[in-house]
Image: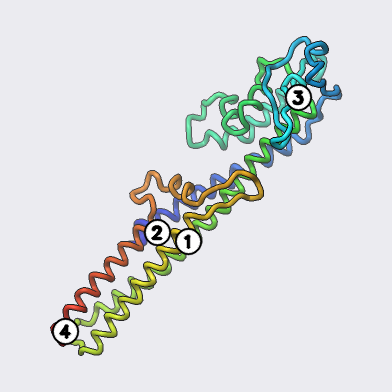
């Protein structure tokens, strides 16, 4: 019962933990590389004067400062052809770190900027586009850093959820193995050799194990309902992660499925014992 379903679930979680760890390292390397790049020495142009001081701007894309102040891309993405192409170096950094991780399970030929959109957002992708005349200003550097940091934080949150899922699965395996071992041992003695009192004790023992199964189901439901915020507005629901993890498996909720099946098995055994009790009464 546990080998086929819960062990498969544990293997799936371990696989995802490896992928998440790879992603965290990739974003850490990307952030470190971006941090080492020097932004242009030019002063950001206020939005009200950008049109008169900068003939060519990338677009009207805006970047937000922690969700409070919107800054038009015109004020942070400007064309200075005499400066080194730091934007190209950012693209190269992304291609060497985040892109391989992000496309590992899909078509690796996905265009680089499509991956940037998926991982860092469309605003950053617009700023990094090679067709966009641009300047690596302090504001753009900060916007890239904040987006990468947010994704890394999301991966750290996912790591915590996966750790909790591993603990829940392991506890379920231990509990279920204990009940199955007891049932196997108890089944060695035929009920026909039991007296009335022994049958009553067996019935109570089965009832106690059914209570354990039902209690574990309740605890599992509580785990599924939990969320983790990791200090950010974004919240990760455990149930959503579980549905994502096991979407291609036989059981979408393996712990609940196995616990319910075990409860039913104990119930069937209890019914057989009760039948013997009635006949002995």
Badge 3 marks a residue whose secondary structure is: helix
Dot label at residue 192: 4
Q: Is residue 212 above or below residue 56?
A: below
- Residue carrying label 3: 86
Q: How far is the residue under mark 1 from the one under mark 3?
A: 47 Å
| Residue 270 rendering spot, x and y as whole percentages | 24, 75
Badge 2 marks a residue whose secondary structure is: helix
| Residue 52 rendering spot, x and y as whole percentages | 81, 11
Residue at image point 74% right, 19% down: 74
Q: Nearer the viewer, residue 53 or 20?
A: 53
Q: Is residue 33 left or right of 188 when viewed as pictured?
A: right
| Residue 166 rendering spot, x and y as whole percentages | 50, 58
| Residue 184 rendering spot, x and y as whole percentages | 29, 74
Cβ atoms at labels 2 and 1 below 8 Å apart: yes
Badge 4 marks a residue whose secondary structure is: helix
- Residue carrying label 2: 255
Q: How far is the residue under mark 2 from the one under mark 4?
A: 34 Å
């Amino acid at each position: 019962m546990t080998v086929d379903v819960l062990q498969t679930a544990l293997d799936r979680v371990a696989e995802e933990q490896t992928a998440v760890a790879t992603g965290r390292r990739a974003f850490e390397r990307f952030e470190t590389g971006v941090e080492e790049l020097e932004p242009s020495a030019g002063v950001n142009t206020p939005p009200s004067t950008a049109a008169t001081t900068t003939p060519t701007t990338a677009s009207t894309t805006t970047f937000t400062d922690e969700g409070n102040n919107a800054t038009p891309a015109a004020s942070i993405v400007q064309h200075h052809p005499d400066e080194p192409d730091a934007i190209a170096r950012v693209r190269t950094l992304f291609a060497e770190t985040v892109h391989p991780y992000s496309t590992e399970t899909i078509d690796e030929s996905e265009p680089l900027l499509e991956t940037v959109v998926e991982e860092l957002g469309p605003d950053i992708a617009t700023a990094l586009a090679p067709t966009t005349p641009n300047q690596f200003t302090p504001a753009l550097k900060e916007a890239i850093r904040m987006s990468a940091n947010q994704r890394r934080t999301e991966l750290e949150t996912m790591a915590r959820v996966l750790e909790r899922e591993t603990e829940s699965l392991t506890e379920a395996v231990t509990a279920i193995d204990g009940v199955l071992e007891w049932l196997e041992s108890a089944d060695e003695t035929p009920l026909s050799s039991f007296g009335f009192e022994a049958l009553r004790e067996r019935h109570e023992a089965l009832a106690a194990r059914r209570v354990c199964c039902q209690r574990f189901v309740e605890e599992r439901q509580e785990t599924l309902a939990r969320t983790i915020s990791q200090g950010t507005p974004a919240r990760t629901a455990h149930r959503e992660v579980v549905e994502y993890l096991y979407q291609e498996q036989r059981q979408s909720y393996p712990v609940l499925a196995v616990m319910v099946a075990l409860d039913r098995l104990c119930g069937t055994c209890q019914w057989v014992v009760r039948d013997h009790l009635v006949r002995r009464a």
